[in-house]
Amino acid sequence: MTGVWVLLGVVLLSVAVGVVLRLRDGRFRPARHHQSAREDAVDATAAIPYGSGPDGGLGAEVAEVGAALGERATLLQFSTAFCAPCRTTRRVLAGVAEMVPGVRHVEVDAEAHLELVRRLGVRRTPTVLILDADGREVRRASGAPPTRDAVFATLDEIATPRQMRADDDSSG
Amino acid sequence: MVDPRGLRFTAAVTTVVLAIVLATGSGWLLLGQTVVFAVAAVAGVRYAPYGLVFRSLIRPWLGPPATMEDAAPPRFAQVVGLLCGAVGAAGYLCGAWVVGCVAVALAFVAAFLNAAFEFCLGCQLYLFFRSTTAKGVSS
């Protein structure tokens, strides 16, 4: 009889976990290191930066994986071989990068860059970071492929408050 | 490449079997399920017993799938299932009921999420395990 109660509890737990994952996965959230200062300042330089570049830009990190930042934004995707939604994510992001000038899609094999994965706090795949022109992480989504519309909306959002800074990246 | 509907069918059957195991505490049934996990993990999901049932009995009624999926992620998930099943069966059969319960509960959550939400828990946690266990200065 105890087993039946255990089963009931585990079923309820599974449903709860599933619903929460459905609601959260694949949605873009503000980058964590910007979060505290986000309300009053767009440039949250006081917060702890992730990247090694000025203001926590990830230009050097992107160069390290053999790519360069997009002029306007970079869609940085972390994938593993054991990740079915990574394929869908790749299709969505590559499509957006093709359609929007200045936006580049960079896919990183997470297993080959575990040090970077740890530093950026990437725990699941796919994880997508949207970087601004300076390579700073502005948004992050993980666990499921973001929709194409969500990527477009986020790109619009991060492009509006700040005028585009041309050729300031030190990714060389 | 495998038919995603077959994977989901496999997950659904696995969920039911694990539910019966949880309810009855049957170590022998769990052992059977563990063998099923082992076949899928070793031979590949194409030869997974439930997958064969799907292909021979259900797929002819459904027709060809719209898309195919990579076989590596679900195979990894079967390995995770195999580990949970082995620990759980050992627990139940040796009288460590709680150990059996916890192991089966974990496997159940994973199979249920896969069947009901198309969410592959093992696939997603793979990176987490790698990044916490491996020394990983490799690039």
Image: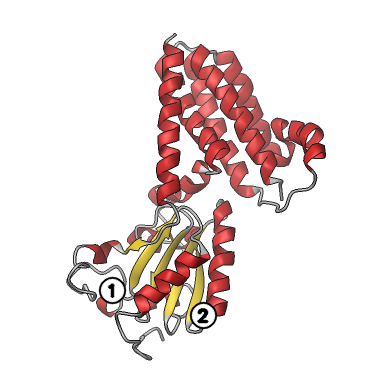
Residue A81 position in % (x across, y down): 57, 55
Residue B47 disc label = none
Task: Tell me the quarter of the image containing the C terminus of chain A.
Answer: bottom left
Residue B56 position in % (x across, y down): 81, 34
Q: Secondary structure at mark 1?
A: helix
* Residue B44 visible in the displayed image: no
The kind of residue on which mark 1 rests is Gly
Residue B69 position in % (x across, y down): 67, 51
The residue sitting at 42% across, 82% down in the picture is: A72
Task: Tell me the quarter of the image containing the N terminus of chain A.
Answer: top left
Q: Secondary structure at mark 2?
A: loop
Measured along the vertical axis of the image, is residue A61 above or below residue B51? Answer: below
The residue sitting at 74% across, 37% down in the picture is: B47
Q: Where is mark 1, residue-wise?
A: A56
Residue B78 picture quarter: top right
Q: Chain of mark 1?
A: A
Task: State the residue in front, A40 or B95.
Answer: A40
* Residue B27 visible in the displayed image: yes
Q: Is residue A162 left or right of residue A71?
A: left
How was this image coloured?
secondary structure
The kind of residue on which mark 2 rests is Val
